[in-house]
Image: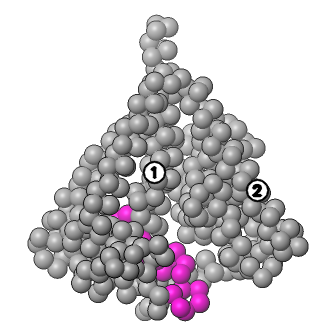
Amino acid sequence: MILLGLITWMLCLTNNLIINLNVKKNSLIKLYKTINFLFDFNILVSIAQYLIMMIEYKTINPFTSQLGTSAGDSIKGIFANSSVNMIICSFAFIFYYSNKKTIKAVLNIVVMFLTTYMSGILIFFSIFSIFIFFASKMVLYKKMLIVLAAILIGGIFYSISKENIDYAIIIGNTVLEDIPPRKITSFEQTFQNATSNIPTLIFGSGMRNFSSRLAFIAGGEYVSWYPPSLVRLSDVFYNNHFRLWNYEVLSVPFSDGTANQPFSVFNQIVGEYGIIGSLILLVFYIGGYFFNSLRNKYSRFFLFLLLGFMFLDYWFEYFSVIVFFELINSYWQKKTLDAKLSLIKQK
């Protein structure tokens, strides 16, 4: 598992280097066409998946079929699950919004809602609202039009899948109760573990020993393909996050929503790599993108959006969300720099 963890981080680094190299080598037109193709293909597959549900369950609205609220789980697009698809569609929306491609931006918003990844949708609209009203120089009437459009789409979705909206409201109301969602409990456990002793605070509990996709895979109750003979549970993992997510807990209906998942990049980095790992992520990754984002307002919004999504899963262990984040950000940086170089040449 340690070897697999090291390979995962090396692949993350390799991906970053390959993207930066190819963005430098290729023209903006070619980069745009590449990104556009990936997003278009994903939308087409997502629409096909919705149509397949319509045919299979003989209804225009699969959310009213026997699938109920779980109909959105089938809207995976070209990715592993619907949650990844929702986040990629949010990236696509910002990409097309920045390029003034209204129809494609709206299509991605629609697919975002259809995935019913309510935690991700809430984070997206919260950060997007802040961006529109406080960071954008857009005139007021356009801001109001965007708000009205969002309300309209939300209203349409409510009529399609009222249960998902109601579920999100119920979860939101439980955050401050005596028994909060297990997501909140997971952050409390991470803090308690990190402050339990000085070595753990500085260096963390070690790779796959506290909170990560690798830890759950090694625990034997996350994927079906992992060999039983290699199952390993560290004491600190077993006594904390494993108790929040295992077969016994998941036997209770509706116990597997995002609000109850201990998955989070912050749990992983703080819990397994301590202050040292957190500083490395903050300075060399987040800090680097923040410095570059000062040149482009969309990059700045994109970074804060990624930070919000980091509360929801171990995204560095999926080769999807981070790949698109880095690709689009690099495209925007190249676009900004090329524009500045063009101005310098003209002068």
Q: Nearer the viewer, residue 96 or 217?
A: 217
Q: Main secondary structure of the magenta part?
A: loop
Q: Is residue 56 left or right of residue 84?
A: right
Q: Residues within 10 Å of mark 1 (few under 14, many from 20)?
A: some
* Displayed quadrant of residue 56: bottom right
Q: Based on the picture, tell me whether residue 128 belongs to the magenta stretch.
A: no
From this view, report whether residue 316 is shown above or below residue 301: below
Q: Earlier in the sequence, mark 1 or mark 2?
A: 2
Residue at 15% in and 65% down: 202
Q: Residue at x 39, y 75 (%)?
A: 227
Crowd rating for badge 2 (residues with CA inside 10 Å; few <14, some 14–19, many 20+): some
Query: Which color scheme is applied?
Result: one colour
Does 329 appear above or below 280?
above
Q: Nearer the viewer, residue 260 or 239?
A: 239
Tag 1 secondary structure: helix
> Which x, y percent locates residue 338?
48, 21
Question: Which mark identifies residue 261?
Answer: none
Q: Position of residue 242 (x, y in %)?
A: 36, 83
Between the residue at mark 1 and the residue at mark 2, the CA separation in whole angstroms equals: 24 Å
Whether residues under marks 1 and 2 lie with C-beta atoms below 8 angstroms apart, the answer is no
Q: Amino acid at mark 1?
A: Ile
Write the residue at 59% across / 64% down: 81
Q: Which mark is residue 322?
A: 1
Is residue 261 found inside the magenta-colored segment of the image? yes
Q: Which residues are magenta?
A: 250-266
The residue identified by callout 2 is: 47
For the N terminus, the quadrant is bottom left
Q: Is residue 120 left or right of residue 322?
A: right
Q: Is residue 1 visible?
A: yes
Disc 2 secondary structure class? helix
How many marks the image carries: the answer is 2
Dot 2 amino acid type: Ile
